[in-house]
Amino acid sequence: MRLVLQLVARLLLIVALCLDAATIWATFDAYRSIDRATAASAQRVAQALQALYWHELLLRSSRMREHLVPVPEWRTLETMKLISPGVCVEFQPATAFEKPLCGQSQGIGRAPPRWFASIVPTFLGSHAEAVRPVSPRAAAAGTVVATPDEAAAISLAWEYILNVIDVALLMAAAIALLASLAIAHTLAPARAIVTALQRMARGQYRTKLPRFRSMELGMIGGAVEKLGSRLEESVEQRAALTRRLIEIRDDERRALARELHDEFGQNLSAILAFANTVETASTKDGDHGIAQDAHMISQATHHLMASLRDALKRLRNPLPEELGLEASLVNLVDSWRSQSATQPTIQLDLKGDLTDISGPAATTAYRVAQECLTNALRHGAAREISLHVERCPGEDDALLIRVEDDGGGDAARVARSAGFGLTGIRERVAAAGGSLSILPASRGLSVAATIPLAA
């Protein structure tokens, strides 16, 4: 799952939890606000009746105080204005058949659902009545008792909760949307970092990243650039070391070729001369047994000399240094074709301008073609082999060498092989900064190498 989606999902979860907490708080606050409204109604009515009580007492000082209770004319429209909706107020001691004076409760809120009307009182309890004396200095003046209407209280609470939830939902949606956009904008540079890492995985180590506003992403980008620089330096050092090792190995091969030609070749020539002499002398003397043995020695010596010539061809300096890449490839294919009529068919396909390819790139291409043809001819049962060499011009000027055969074989097993031939061409291709792949073909194997050419 993408990081942006994860962060947005977590943000939505937090918003949902906050919305739930806001709903619970709004329910509790709305339900308990009725208690505050009840107490406030009792206090306002008590203060109004206190002023009325002392006013009547001063005007009618001849009357007994108990004759002033209840305060005359207290059930007025002015008193109704002091009572909150859903609250009923009564005067005690109440006269006979006196009903509480209640605030307007019709249309003060939406009808709550049954589950809300049953759950809220169960968890939050019932409302308490508020009692206030008319006059703290005159206990005989009576008291004001305010009692909330349970149904009206629940309706008011439900209306308040709906209003709060509407605002909370709008705020939650706005916060989620704006925060999601901010998260996506903040993490957008991460895509550039991932792209740079993917290019590094393909071998493009030096990658310039843009400047990031975020300090953390800037640190990550700087670390990626440093890593790419160090990887490129390491690859260059490894390639230089491999090239040096290949040069040393080529020098040893040439020295070995000289030693084999000078020492081993001369000794084989001497053995062949002695065998011919013995065969000729034995034939004249009629000793056919010795003549036959000498002839067999001559044949074995010819075979050794042929093998020596093949080894010297492989050990000597490659032909590209003398003939050029195109001519040396043609000569390589012709030499394999001329060795025996039973050899499989070898097709050579050259594309592009190969005339100016020289130096290590030409040597590497020739060695790859030589080794792949040798493996296909000696270690497989191929009937047809194709050698395709193509120059791909453009910004990425490179040379493509591909050898395919129909001799079967397991590509995965060959790729894991640690033989000297494959190891050698891997080292050469890596030293040239190229790549080597061994894949299954339609009826055999396909070995492909890409060698970049110097500008």
Image (cartoon, helix red, strand yellow):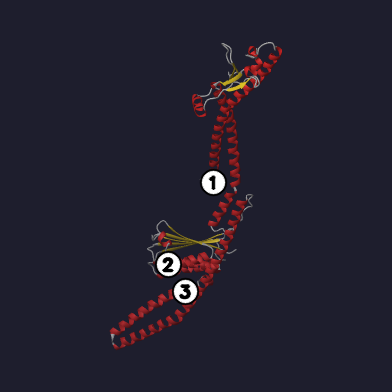
Q: Give left or right: position of 299 versus 177.
A: left
Q: Nearer the viewer, mark 2 or mark 1?
A: 1
| Residue at left offset 58%, top offset 33% | 168
Question: Is residue 86 in view from this perspective?
Answer: no
Question: Sequence order check: which comes first, mark 1 or mark 3?
Answer: 1
- Coordinates of residue 14 in the picture (x, y in percent): 55, 39
Question: Is the C-beta separation of discs 1 and 3 under 8 Å?
Answer: no
Question: Is the C-beta separation of discs 2 and 1 under 8 Å?
Answer: no
Q: Nearer the viewer, mark 1 or mark 3?
A: 1
- For badge 1, the amino acid type reads Leu
Residue at the disc numbered 1? 3
Give the vertical position of 54 relative to 176 (above or below).
Answer: above
Mark 3 residue element: helix
Give the vertical position of 59 relative to 343 (above or below).
Answer: above
Q: Give left or right: position of 417 versus 153.
A: left
- For badge 3, the amino acid type reads Leu
| Residue at left offset 55%, top offset 64% | 234
Residue at the disc numbered 3? 315
Residue at the disc numbered 2? 419
* Closest to the observer, 382 or 238: 238
Q: Distance of mark 3 from mark 2, alpha carbons?
A: 17 Å
- Other-residue count near label 2 (Cα within 10 Å), few / some / many at <14 / 14–19 / ≥20: few
